[in-house]
Amino acid sequence: MTKEKINIHSRAGFIYCFLAGAVLFVFTSTFAATNKEKATMLSVNDSGTELSITACHEGMCKTITIPETMLDTIDNGYSQISLEDLTLDGISEVILTHNAEGSVNACSKVYRYDSEIETLRSMDKLQSQLCNYSIENDYLISSYRSGAKWHEDIYKIKNNDLILTISDSCIGCDYINRALYLDGRKTENLLVKNSPDYRLRAPISTTVTSEKATLYSEPNINKTTKMYLINGDVVALTDATSDENYFWYKIRYVTKKGTLINAWLHCEDINFCEQ
């Protein structure tokens, strides 16, 4: 009899815990949904003679202070004003775009709302201004032409911010120069294959074709080292340059003992130049 009572109490406790958990789940879901709906909404009123930006939160709206730096940016030609949530946090950024006549670049400067001081701040973590940008999943891609070369900066959208991860130069060339970034600092350079899609730009590796390829500390014929590679050694290409007499590649090579070597060699010493 005692055993049966314990079972009944256990069953009742289970039902109580289940119902309490269900109520907690509903409350949590409702609370999260309510919070999500309470994101600050920005609106722009540009009459042509006066610009005002309003921030609304939980039914309360007020005109926010526009910083002088932003007004100066508008005066300098970034006069096309739009709102877009670039950081995917539910709060739009203010985008100031400059469409220069005859230019392929439509470049923008970005300001985000700071609710603590009720004004707008420039997004300082950007590599440069955003140009012809697009958003793909959790990444923002800024694409622009400088001189005869196209460049792309790829930002990861994370923690309500834009974090630079990749900067590619010379899109459409035989190879692309890539810089990798971590926490805002450049950590690595490498050469990658050309592709319109940055995700398909694989690092370039090649083999040594010379019987003995001398390695150099700098792309200079007078900067020889005691190191050399032999036919069949596989290297990664990380940089390239040229002088009056030679075309040089910087290589990364890992020895059988695991030692990492970064050095320069002549283009004629590797298979990549024979393709």
Image: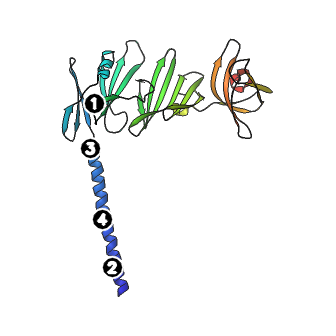
Residue drawn where x is 40% and y is 28% of the image: 124
- Label 3 is placed on what type of residue? Glu
Q: Is 16 left or right of 184, judged from the image as shown? A: left
Residue corresponding to mark 3: 37
Residue 96 is situated, as x and y percent measured from the top left of the image, at: 33, 23
Q: CA distance from mark 4 to mark 3?
A: 26 Å
- Label 4 is placed on what type of residue? Ala
Position of the C terminus by quadrant: top right
* Mark 4: secondary structure: helix
Residue drawn where x is 19% and y is 33% of the image: 62
Of the residues under marks 4 and 3, which one precedes in the sequence?
Answer: 4
Residue 126 is situated, as x and y percent measured from the top left of the image, at: 43, 28
**Residues at circles 1 and 4 in contact by the CB criterion of under 8 Å:** no
* Mark 3: secondary structure: helix
Q: CA distance from mark 3 to mark 2?
A: 43 Å
Residue 232 is situated, as x and y percent measured from the top left of the image, at: 76, 32
Q: CA distance from mark 4 to mark 2?
A: 18 Å
- Way the structure is coloured: rainbow
Q: CA distance from mark 1 to mark 4?
A: 43 Å
Q: Is 261 left or right of 65, judged from the image as shown? A: right
Q: Is residue 149 above or below residue 41?
A: above
Of the residues under marks 1 and 4, which one precedes in the sequence?
Answer: 4
Residue corresponding to mark 1: 119
Q: What's the mark number on residue 8?
A: 2
Q: Is residue 19 above or below residue 64?
A: below
| Crowd band around label 2 with a 10 angstrom C-alpha radius: few (<14), some (14–19), many (20+) | few
Residue 174 is situated, as x and y percent measured from the top left of the image, at: 60, 22
- Label 2 is placed on what type of residue? Ile
**In this view of the protein, which residue sits in the foreground, 115 or 242?**
115
